[in-house]
Every structure is written in structure tokens, then in C-alpha cells.
Image: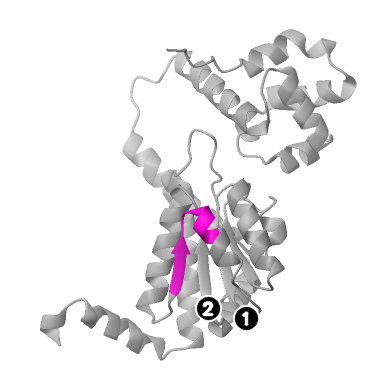
Amino acid sequence: MNQAAEAPRVLLMLRHSLTTYSQTLQRLGQFVLDQPQRVLYLTITELARESGTSEASVTRLCRVVGCRGYTEFKMALALETQQEQASQPQPLTTDATSCLIEESVSALRDTGALLSETALRQSASLLNQARQIQIYGVAASAIIGDYLSYRLLRMGISAQQFSDMHRAAMNAASLAEGDVVIAVSSSGSTKDLLHTVQLAKGRGAHVIVLSNTSRSPLAALADQLLVAAKPEGPLTAGSFHSKISAMLIIELLVQRLLEDHPERETAISDSAKATLPWLI
């Protein structure tokens, strides 16, 4: 049995060889060395912009340090920073429960501050007028998509939810003007999801994106972008903070839909009774 290849030591490589790189790669490499934790949450586009380089330069740096691409680069960087943190002396006592609660509260507050009321209102308008609604999301984002589907169904709004992007692509190919796609992706960079959303957009469907980053390939396809706080890193996919932020946006969207159509309160009551037949 072949042993799994050891992840490249990105930071070690940069510290050791940075001076031998071109000026552009030196600037980019120094940015990574100075802010490794921040880089974990940046898309390739964001890293290129904030370091004053280009996406091509980011790709070159990834290959120079032994990674096949940016995704592998971030995973290697995440593993290395985790190992370095683990090797440092830890406080004698840590109140993990209080820390989790405070970070969760912070995520909700930050989401409220980030959220565009205009985007929320226009997203609700698109859903109110939709001929049909489709929800696409994979892995942990599929959980959020399923929750969104449930909340809409409680109001009498039917929406199909797809976590298999092959089936989602077939669905997207059948869409038309008046249909709405809600794409859920924390990173906004999932290739299969991007392909599917491009198909839907090409058919004339409106696209609402629910994400934890405001700049990404998926965000660029959005007619309306709803941004939740707390982006995920390679080792924190599905983290509680990012998901609770996305769920807050869903609740705010539901609230807006009810404000636009108060009669949907009746549908909520009816759907509740439907699951408790002995109360009818």
C-alpha cells in the first residue's frame, strides 16, 4: 500500500527560499508569511488583489512550493499552521464553551453588519415572483440548502434542493426565464456548483448566492448576493460559526417574505397541522 504523500511545508519553504524568487513572488510570499491565518480565508482572486500581484502569480507560487494548485496550497498551509500552533505552549486553562458562545454571537453580529438590506429585499422579490425555485449546494452547504428548503416549505413555497451536482446540472439545463436558483457555497469556488449555476444563468434563470465571501467566482454570477460572516478555511469546512451565520440570513429572508405576504402565516399554520394529524 502506498503511503499518502506528505503535505508540502509551505511556510518553511517560503522562509528558506523567499530571497531566491522573483520580486513579484517575493512580495506574494512575504504576504503569506506575514498573514498565514488570513490567507486561509481568501480566494485566489482576493489573495492576488490584496498582495498586489495576479492570479497567475499565485498559481506560480503554489507550484514553486510543491503544490498542484491553490486548493492544495491552502490545505498544506492550514495543516502547517495548525501544527505550529499545537507546538506552542498552551494556557493552563481554556474555557472552550465561553469561547464558542462568544465567537457565535460575534458571527451573528458581523453577519447583521455585512448584510445588504437591498439584496435581502430584492432576493425576496425574486422568490415571490419565481416560476419555480431550485437550491444547489454540496457537502456542508447542502445542509444549509436543506434548511432553506424546509423554511420555504413551511410557508407553502415549494423548492427543489440538489446536493448531487450531476442531477443539479440536468435540472439547470431545463430552467427558463422566471425561474430562480439559490446557490449555497461558503467559499464560492466549488467547480461543479459553478458549472451548474452557469448553466442555469445561460437558460435565463435568476441567481441568488448565499455565501461566506463577497468576492468569488460564484459571487460574480449572482444577481443578488447574500453574505454571511465567518468564512471557512480548509480545515474548518462546515464550521458552526459560518453555518449559523448562513442560517441567520435564511431567517431574515423568511421574515422579509412574510412581511411581503402576511397571508403565508396561514400556510405555516397549515403545514404545522399537516404533521400533527391528530390535532386536526
Q: Residue at x 52, y 23 (%)?
A: 79
Q: Nearer the viewer, residue 132 or 104?
A: 132
Q: Residue at x 49, y 57 (%)?
A: 246
Q: Nearer the viewer, residue 131 or 228?
A: 131
Q: Quadrant of residue 86?
A: top left
Name the residue that disc number 2 marks: 132
Horizontal and vertical percent position of residue 53: 84, 34
First in residue order: circle 2 vs circle 1? 2
Horizontal and vertical percent position of residue 243: 45, 52
Indicate the quadrant containing the N terminus: top left, top right, bottom left or bottom right: top left
Name of the residue lying farthest toward the left: 278
| Three-letter code for the amino acid on which mark 1 is drawn | Gly
Horizontal and vertical percent position of residue 131: 55, 82
Marks 2 and 1 close (CB-CB < 8 Å):
yes
Q: Tell me where the magenta segment starts and ends, as one range.
A: 159-168
| Three-letter code for the amino acid on which mark 2 is drawn | Gln
The answer to whether residue 98 is above or below residue 58 is below
